[in-house]
Image (cartoon, rainbow, N blue to C red):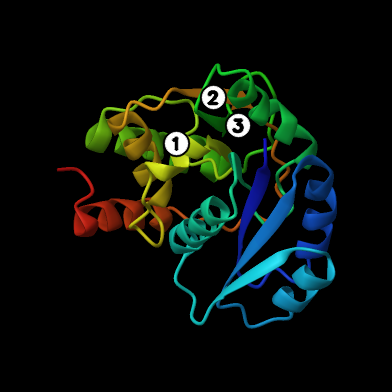
Amino acid sequence: MKKICVIPAYNEAQNISEVIKRVRPFVDEIVVIDDGSQDEMAIMAKQAGATVLRHAVNRGQGAALQTGNEYALLRGADIIIHFDADNQFQAEEIPDLIAPIESGQAEAVLGSRFLSKKSDLPALKKNLIMPLARLINRWFFNIRLSDPQSGFRVLSRDAAEKIIISNDRMAHCSEILHQLFKNKIKTIEIPITVVYHEFGQKFSGGIRIIKDLAIKRIIK
């Protein structure tokens, strides 16, 4: 099975080379979506061996993931991995998320920071932002998952072909979940470890998610 890793990135020059180095052993190709970066990230990603696609302006992570999915499908990917560029995910866990798809157990696998492994979540994220995100998913989509906002996920080709990410920014995680359940794509969660290097997420992020969902009118 051809495995392509999609890495959305914005101004991640300090991390991108290390992330690509760590991911490379587990996939056949890495594509970095340079979402309008103003640093040297694109040059460094190319030097590290990744394919780089560039947005002329910063459109948001949802738009970058959609660009990456489209590219990966055109390249014949059987499995598409979404992986963040900030060096917080553990590349060594990629095979754990791929395995259920290879075995036919699932069509989509979502990494969860709230299962058996322990992730060092900032207190604000753990006690306020994540509970708010879970409520959002229940209110808008009637979806109950342990981790509503994880950016570490793996999709089979069939699953990726059924998902169109129209929300460019904050609400794309909820939109992806909605489409997985709407299309009855067999989805499971797998525990992951996340090591946080920065603690900058704010409560306002949750408010922007609600606003984005309302504006885009994802649910019909």
- Residue 169 position in % (x across, y down): 41, 61
- Characterize the local packing of mark 2: few (<14), some (14-19) or many (20 or more) Cα atoms within 10 angstroms: some
Kindly indicate the quadrant of the structure image that contains residue 81: top right
For the point 50% across and 36% down, the residue is 127
Q: Nearer the viewer, mark 2 or mark 3?
A: 2
Q: Nearer the viewer, residue 123 or 21?
A: 21
Q: Is residue 102 visible?
A: yes
State whether residue 19 is above or below residue 146. Answer: below
Split into 4 quadrants, where in the image is the C terminus? top left
Element at badge 1? helix
- Residue 177 position in % (x across, y down): 39, 37
**How far apart are labels 1 and 3 at the CA level?**
22 Å
13 vs 8, left or right, is right
Task: Give the residue type at disc 1.
Answer: Ala
Q: Is residue 197 visible?
A: no
What residue is disc 1 on?
159
Q: Nearer the viewer, residue 22 or 144?
A: 22
Circle on res. 113: 3
Task: Give the residue type at disc 3.
Answer: Arg
State whether residue 103 is above or below residue 210. Answer: above
13 vs 208, left or right, is right
For the point 49% across and 60% down, the residue is 61
Q: Residue furthest left?
A: 220
Circle on res. 189: 2
**How far apart are labels 2 and 1 at the CA level?**
15 Å
- Characterize the local packing of mark 1: few (<14), some (14-19) or many (20 or more) Cα atoms within 10 angstroms: many
